[in-house]
Image: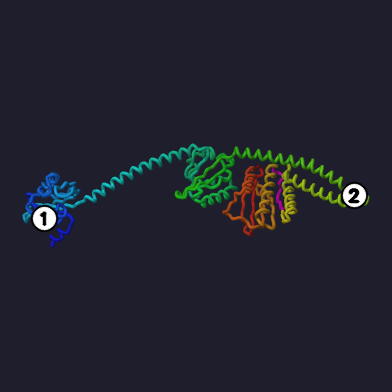
Amino acid sequence: MESEVADSLPVLIAVLDLERRYRYCNAAYRDWFGLDPQTLIGQRFEEVVGDAVYQIARPHIQRVLEGTEVNFEGTFAYQHGPTRHVNVNYAPQRDAAGQVTGYVSLTVDVSRQRDTELRLRELTSELEAKVRARTHELHQTVEALQSTVQSAPDTVLVLDAVGHILNANPPALRLFGLPTEQLIGQSLSAFLPTAHVEEFSEFFEEAKRVSPDIRSTEPRESMLRHANGALIPIEVAIGVSPRLDHFTAFIRDISRRRDLESELMRVAVDERRHIAQDLHDSLCQEISAVHFAVVALAQRLKEDRSGEAETTRKIGLMIEETLDHARHIAHGLGPVMEEGDDLVRALRRLARTTEDLCKMPCGMQSNGNFSDVNRDAGTQLYYITQEALNNVLRHAHATRMDIELSRENNEVVLRVSDNGRGFHPTGDSTGRGVRFMRYRAASVQGTLRLRKRAAGGTELECRVPVTS
């Protein structure tokens, strides 16, 4: 039974005596060498396997005959059959007195395993080489990116998912007035004026919803408080790294650009005011003179019972309408003069004109004294109101509009609301009209926000500090 089991195994099993002569060998010898196991009985080990294999196995045979079990591995070039990589185990065989009488040999062909191991080593070596090369490339890329970020003229911040600063490049020192180690761990919102915190929080939440294909938000203007307390106008965009759950804030100081834009806007406003003054003092006066002359002519023709009297009267009415239109244009071009209270009068006039021309109710309420509002702030508030009303008329499908001007602490607060269809809170609130209104508000250090009203419609809120 044991012999049958041994014959069924694909390994060489043999029993040899002290002279290395075979006393038993299993059927695997036939499979390995094409030799009949029975013919091998009595032959020496080296006669069967060849001298080359014997020289490799010789020291191990000596040890097993000394009574020590031996295990070794090697490549054997057998004289019968192919070269094989084998694992060999020699165990001493003893008699009843414990004396070594020979040994049992168990030889397993591990050529395939050996080839697999060699191939795995080759593949591992190739993979390690590729990993080293890729790691080197990544290190170079990271170094290049770090160099770019560190040398960038704009501030670059790495933020976590709640807006805390994880890292900052050198320009942050100039913008914030604090070293990097004092910035890390703080919330970016902590450096924003109170009036800008809520708007930035909404902007940051929008960044989390940005499509992975886009990777970054559109730049948004805001204000940042320097360590010395100064307010700095900034432009900020948020880059998204969804796999890392990190965000990158790209912040640019736009103080010089804002100064140039404000100066350009002041020049444009002054020019509009000059044109309005010319219209009022020249063209309107000339039209008014023509109107009086035509009215006088119509009266004389009426007294003379002339048939042209009625035609002349109608011409006078047309001239009067033209005069009113010219005055509306003049007021639109130069709505606010030196006094802050002129803003209230200008907004009331704008509400009446809008209501008359557009046939839509437009209310106007004011609460407070606005005499300390300077001309630039008042002018921009007027134009923001004008643009907001135009947006309502074009897009809101409303049936009523309202203008409200009030004082809250040290701010002038303008609100323009309607009862139209409103806007989607996650939709595009950066259209050209809205961007231009934000730009006007920012030019006088103000903020502008759009809200969807609970009762329906939209409310625009613009806050401008009185000192702007």
Residues packed near mark 2 inside 10 Å, few (<14), some (14 to 19) or many (20 plus) = some
User: Left or right: where does residue 164 sit relative to residue 283?
Assistant: left
Q: What residue appears at the point 75 percent right and 42 percent down from the top-left corner?
A: 276
Q: Position of residue 81 (x, y in %)?
A: 16, 50
Residue labelled with disc 1: 37
- Residue 180 seen in the figure: yes
In reply to whether residue 79 is colored magenta, the answer given is no
SS state under label 1: helix
Residue labelled with disc 2: 299
Q: CA distance from mark 1 to mark 2?
A: 147 Å
Question: From this viewpoint, which residue is outermost toward the right?
Answer: 304
Question: From this viewpoint, which residue is outermost toward the bottom?
Answer: 1
Q: Mark 2 belongs to which amino acid?
A: Gln
Q: Position of residue 404 (x, y in %)?
A: 69, 52
| Quadrant in the picture for the C terminus | top right
Q: What residue appears at the point 45 percent right and 50 percent down from the top-left corner?
A: 243
Q: Which residues are magenta?
A: 364-374
Q: What residue appears at the point 14 percent right and 57 percent down from the top-left corner?
A: 27
